[in-house]
Amino acid sequence: MNELNELLEQRYRTVLRLLPRSYRAEREEEMVAAFMEGGEVPDEENPRPGWGEIASVLALSTRVRLGGAGATPRFVAWGAAVRLVATLGLAFHAAAGAFTLTSLAFTAPGSMTRPLGVLAAALWAAAFVLLMRGHVRTAKPVALAAGAAALVELAAWQIAGGLFVPLDVVSPVLNVVVPLAALFAGFHSDVPPVRRAWLPTVLPLAAGLVLRAVVLALLAPALGKVPLLWPWVDLMGLATVALVAAGIVCLARNLPAYVPLALAILGTLMLPSRLSVVDDSYLSSGPAVLWASSVGQCVALVVMVVLLAVAGLRGLPATRQSRATV
């Protein structure tokens, strides 16, 4: 029996290696004792931790590494970065959703509409508003439904176009999956909901409305004459401009490490979309200035992502234990 207990204890300690070392240093003995006293042991001849226990340790590890209770300052910073990725990712989708919904007013009668695209647009906008107003638990399933609708529509479009997966399909998939993962992982139970003001809440929605109703309408006549503008005035192009501008401000003001880290992650998500523009510009034998403009955009994005990543990693706090909760 003692040998079996020793085997079970060793296996519990192996599972606890999922946790950060700093967390285990303070709590490993206490957790092993608790598991040994009341743990799930379905097989008495070959005792091992239950799947429920393993899942709970994995969930705890995620929370701690993303700024949960008992996290080090470095993990607190990473948690803030992941939550900012989720917030800005949903803000982009909310702006794109407002853009899509506004486009319906400009659609000619009888034109085909995309029901799933419209549904996803409305759900993204709702999820962002709920998140900003502090209703995180409600925002998560709404955002998940929005992502599912967007991915189903993308899959249907891809199946109709063939099995080849180009860069312009990889980008929207990443732009859906990564913010959703950041939302569910970053806004965990140790993070208290924060109720934001209405101005930053409605700003992305207003931006989407203005883009469709005003900016593109004013720029449309110039696009045919100035191909240089083409890569910069679609939604992802404008988001790239916004990210580069935000990156310059971030680097100039020496903001906390989680801000440049989040912007670097978002910039990396944008890169496949911008590379697809370069590829399309080259293959379509368009004007040389269009290809040069697309390449310039990619270079600017890569340089900014590298600078932001370096600044963020250098600015991370030293690894030391902190009992502060995010």
Image (cartoon, rainbow, N blue to C red):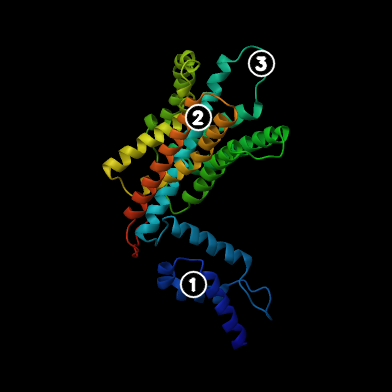
Query: What type is the residue that disc 2 sits on?
Result: Trp
Disc 3 secondary structure class? loop
Looking at the rendered image, the disc whose residue lies closer to the viewer, 1 or 3, is 3
- How far apart, in angstroms, are the residues tagged by discs 1 and 3? 62 Å
Q: Residues within 10 Å of mark 2 (few under 14, many from 20)?
A: many
Kind of residue at badge 1: Met
Mark 3 vs mark 2: which is more N-terminal?
A: 3
Residue at which label 1 appears: 31
In space, the residues marked 3 and 2 are separated at their CA atoms by 32 Å
- Residue 216's place in the image compared with 91, above or below, is above
Q: Which residue is mark 2?
A: 291
Most foreground residue, 288 or 158: 288
Picture quadrant where residue 255 is located: top left
Residue at the limit of the structure toward the left, as seen here: 253
Would you place residue 22 above or below residue 231 in this image? Answer: below
For label 1, the crowd category at 10 Å Cα-Cα, with few meaning under 14, some 14 to 19 and many 20 or more, is: some
Q: Position of residue 226 (x, y in %)?
A: 46, 18
Residue tagged 3 = 111
Q: Residue furthest bottom?
A: 2
